[in-house]
Amino acid sequence: QAWQEQVPVMAYDRIMAVQAGERLVLARRIREALDRQEFELHYQPIRRISDGRIVALEALLRWRQRDGGFVPPDVFIPLAEASGLIVPIGRWTLEQAAQAHGRVAAHGHHDVAIAVNVSAVQLLADNVPEVIRDLQREHRLPRGALHVELTESVLLRQPQVARMRMLELRVAGVGIAIDDFGTGFSSMTYLRNLPLDSIKIDRGFVHQVHADERNASICRALIALAHGLGLGTVAEGVETAEELDWLRRNGCDQAQGYHLGRPAPLDKVIESIVEAA
Ligand code: C2E
Ligand code: CA
Ligand code: CA
Ligand code: CA
């Protein structure tokens, strides 16, 4: 019970990091930004380590304001959650992701999934499985075309609702990854009981993993744990060839990070996929 209380507090802390006045202005600006179409998505490749093939593209929100200002998602997403605006933003993002899958498939790459970050608030406040089923029908998406990335916090707030939604997503053929694994209140119970496909190892643990004995121990343990449960492993924030090489030698399945491709507008990403093929 007590630790469930900490989840909103964490988001609150992040909101408080922004000056109070600025915060109010931002909340109003988020509402306008949706109407004015100031949001865009960038896509970052997730690659299979064994052969370097792109298996998915993670959609990452970008907010470029008309005055040229850039607000990072770490700042505006907690605000959008607090104001409920995460629901329309999340729906817009899923719609964009469905379109993105169609565009990548049109270039012959049908098996590249689009991974979407779904916030805890969004999963609990909106009927995300139904939204996704509608998109699958409308865009004729194959099973597996969309993945969702959930953070651990969602599982602690309303575990029963979260579990139901996840089961529905599984039935709809949506892959489910736990994001930033190891940074929240990881529980072995949910790893055992929830319908997951993979865990994403937080980039804090991946950093210098070839040289940092502590990070190496954690990554080895997380990979063994995931594989023991039949789950895949994705290393986040891979910035060097040395890190990637360590991950390959230690059996990590997939990787993502600046070394393997930076987030970029979809056109750019498609160009690079087509060139590499
Ligand atoms: P995340 O889901 O953990 O996304 C990974 C973040 O790491 C992204 O930051 C990405 O640009 C960055 N990154 C990727 N490779 C590297 C690397 O090699 N080194 C370093 N240092 N960073 C790397 P970004 O785009 O600023 O997003 C921050 C967070 O905002 C995301 O963390 C996610 O929690 C949230 N977010 C982004 N887009 C959405 C969205 O559409 N919906 C929701 N609910 N949250 C989102
Ligand atoms: Ca993510
Ligand atoms: Ca992550
Ligand atoms: Ca992260």
Image (cartoon, rainbow, N blue to C red):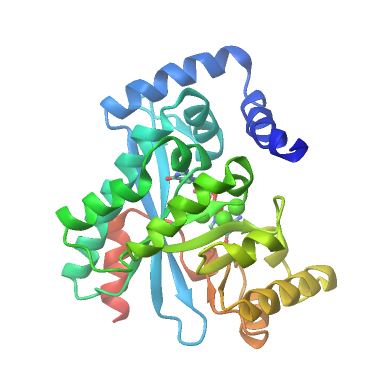
Nearer to us in this view, 135 or 209: 135
Position of the N terminus by quadrant: top right
Asked whether residue 58 is in view, the answer is: no
Position of the C terminus by quadrant: bottom left
- Rendered residue at 80%/74% (across/down): 217
Question: For residue 181, which quarter of the picture?
Answer: bottom right
Question: For residue 157, which quarter of the picture?
Answer: top right
Whether residue 185 sits left or right of residue 232 in the image: it is: right
Residue 145, image x and y in percent?
A: 30, 65
Residue 70, image x and y in percent?
A: 46, 33
- Rendered residue at 68%/67% (across/down): 206
Nearer to us in this view, 195 or 256: 195
Which residue is the extreme one toward the right?
213
- Rendered residue at 51%/64% (across/down): 195
- Rendered residue at 56%/74% (across/down): 231
Whether residue 126 sits left or right of residue 258 in the image: it is: left
Q: Reply above or below: 224 against 127.
A: below
Residue 148, image x and y in percent?
A: 43, 56
Whether residue 99 sits left or right of residue 189 in the image: it is: left
Asked whether residue 119 is in view, the answer is: yes
Q: Reply above or below: 127 against 274.
A: above
Residue 215, image x and y in percent?
A: 78, 68
